[in-house]
Image (cartoon, helix red, strand yellow):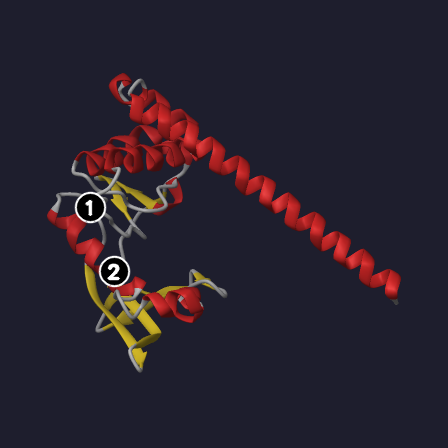
């Protein structure tokens, strides 16, 4: 078993001598917002399988998908799973930026984002980089901006990746605008957390005084 918490279950299973990875997205299966969205789109497990197929068609490496399944009640998702072949390799780290950055840029050049581009979502083996846990999207509106925002998210956790991004990208108006917008959203995210923490602290203090 790799992981088993409120978010995800993932572990190895063996079928007829072949090793596979079984993944069950607990949080996405149980979260109300995700269930409501499931009326209009497939489960995250099915979308991830479709992304693995797409990655292979684009010439990028990812484990061989086997199948995905979902259970619904009255059209609403209640459970899902993904099964794919186990891929040998070590988990990538931020120190692998020289290998990861060109592969992410290749995907972006084809017009796709991968969602959650952090280094932990790649494997490194003798042949190079393997994409894992990717859910591809091909944005139609503000495509360049969204591609650059994902690149900035990647460099925020792997700063050395900046050395492997061409100047034509980092000096572009889209990159600079995306960086400014990302800074604002990060500031608001941290500010909101602090405000909520203070409100919670005050509410707790008021409750204690009443007692």
Residue 87 picture location, percent across and down: 26, 53
User: As drawn, is 144 to the left or to the right of 9?
Assistant: left
150 vs 100, nearest the viewer: 150
Residue 68 picture location, percent across and down: 24, 68
Give the quarter of the figure containing the C terminus.
Answer: bottom right
The answer to whether residue 87 of the structure is visible from this angle is yes
Residue 137 picture location, percent across and down: 24, 48
Question: Residue drawn 21% across and 54% down?
Answer: 52
Up-down relation of residue 13 to residue 51 (above or below): below
- Which of the two labelled residues, at mark 2 and mark 1, occupies the earlier sequence position? 2
Circles 2 and 1: CB atoms closer than 8 Å: no
Residue 197 picture location, percent across and down: 67, 49
Give the quarter of the figure containing the N terminus.
Answer: bottom left
Q: Which mark is residue 47?
A: 2
**Mark nearer the viewer, 2 or 1:** 2
Up-down relation of residue 154 to residue 140 (above or below): above
Q: Which mark is residue 61?
A: 1
Q: Estimate how packed mark 2 is, as few (under 14), some (14 to 19) or many (20 or more) residues with alpha carbons within 10 Å.
A: some
Question: Residue drawn 65% across and 45% down?
Answer: 195
33 vs 9, nearest the viewer: 33
**Gap between marks 2 and 1 measured at Cα:** 17 Å
């Amino acid at each position: 078993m790799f992981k088993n918490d409120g978010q995800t279950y993932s572990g190895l299973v063996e079928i007829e001598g072949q090793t596979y990875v079984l993944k069950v997205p607990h949080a996405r299966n149980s979260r109300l917002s995700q269930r409501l969205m499931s009326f209009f789109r497939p489960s995250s497990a099915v979308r991830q399988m479709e992304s693995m197929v797409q990655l292979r068609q684009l010439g990028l490496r990812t484990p061989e998908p086997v199948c995905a399944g979902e259970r619904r009640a009255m059209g609403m998702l209640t459970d899902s799973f993904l099964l794919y072949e186990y891929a040998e390799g070590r988990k990538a780290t931020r120190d692998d930026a020289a290998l990861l950055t060109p592969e992410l840029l290749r995907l972006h050049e084809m017009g796709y984002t991968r969602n959650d581009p952090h280094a932990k979502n790649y494997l490194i083996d003798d042949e190079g980089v393997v994409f894992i846990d990717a859910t591809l999207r091909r944005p139609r509106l503000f495509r360049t901006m969204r591609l650059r925002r994902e690149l900035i998210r990647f460099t925020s956790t792997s700063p050395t990746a900046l050395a492997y991004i061409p100047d034509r990208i980092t000096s572009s108006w889209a990159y600079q605008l995306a960086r400014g917008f990302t800074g604002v959203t990060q500031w608001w995210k941290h500010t909101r957390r602090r405000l909520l923490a203070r409100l919670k602290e005050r509410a707790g203090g008021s409750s204690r005084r009443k007692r």
